[in-house]
Amino acid sequence: MRWLTFASAAGDSFGYLTSDGSGVVDAGKRSDFADLKSVIAADALAVTAQNLGDQADLALADIEYLPTIPNPDKILCVGLNYKAHQEETGRGGEDYPTIFVRFAGAQMGHEQPMVRPLESNTLDFEGEIAMVIGRAGRRIAEADALSHVAGFGIYNDGSVREYQRHTSQFTPGKNFAATGGFGPWMMTPDEIGDLDAMEIITRLNGHVMQNATADLLVFGFARLIAFCSTFIELVPGDVIVTGTPGGVGAARKPPVFMDEGDVIEVEVKPIGILRNRIVVG
């Protein structure tokens, strides 16, 4: 199933796409759950969908997409997790994942503007697969890790490279307002099938910039969950953004950065497409 968070004329809500993908069942209006994170925490995705059925309450044209999980307890991002990206940056290769954090307030949804800040013209794209944690755990065994996943989504970890490189600690460059695209929805693992076959394609103004499959991750999904849960308890709704393939704009010669009017798309097959237009502000 494909679960999403959205706004409509009635306010902010959440729900899931109908089986034919033509509309949205408004679970926020028709259930007692406050948000998508609370449904995940109750392990109630399947039973909620069974109870509410497949009749759309809203057309897709009537909603505004919000970040799939707008209020996660934490967003853990993985750097340098594809060999090609390590090679183009000259970094990585350690025995452990590179982890940094993104704040929820820096996110925006599908079809919402991604903002190139006034302070820098070095806004770069990073198409990624995001995992949404479904079950809490600390020191999770790698063999059990995937049972803690509620679903997978699409992320664009928009990076202001100039600010990322000011020091060895690059939190500012990863947290400018409205640079973290997350959407359009979360797909449950049963619908995805072979997780390693998921394919990322990033397009800038229609031109393919990145392309890779999940089997090329240096640290796979289960390893990332096991590692992250060693230092912090993972809780329902947490997001792990698993890393970007090679082809980022900063590594190109000459560099390719995004600016006013550009359209950036991140497709993850079979989940869907996350699309954002660049504005300056």
Image (cartoon, rainbow, N blue to C red):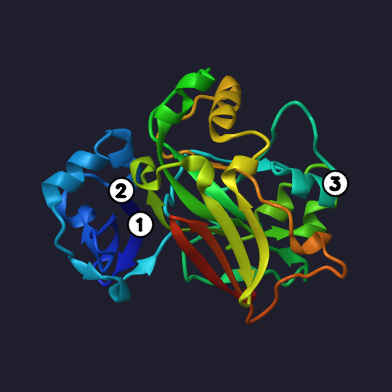
Q: Is residue 77 visible?
A: no
Residue 254 on image: x %, y %: 87, 70
Quadrant in the picture for residue 209:
bottom right
Look at label 1 and name its amino acid. Thr
Residue at 50% x, 24% y is: 233
Give the mark toward the camera: 1 or 2. Answer: 1
Residue 46 on image: x %, y %: 23, 41
Residue at 79% x, 30% y is: 94
In the figure, is residue 82 to the left or right of 3? Answer: right
Which of 174/188 is in front? 188
**Number of numbered discs present?**
3
Q: Is residue 69 visible?
A: yes
Residue 4 on image: x %, y %: 35, 55
Residue 128 on image: x %, y %: 59, 52
Labels 1 and 3: the sequence-earlier one:
1
Quadrant in the picture for residue 14:
bottom left
Look at label 2 and name its amino acid. Asp
Q: Identify the residue under disc 3.
A: 167
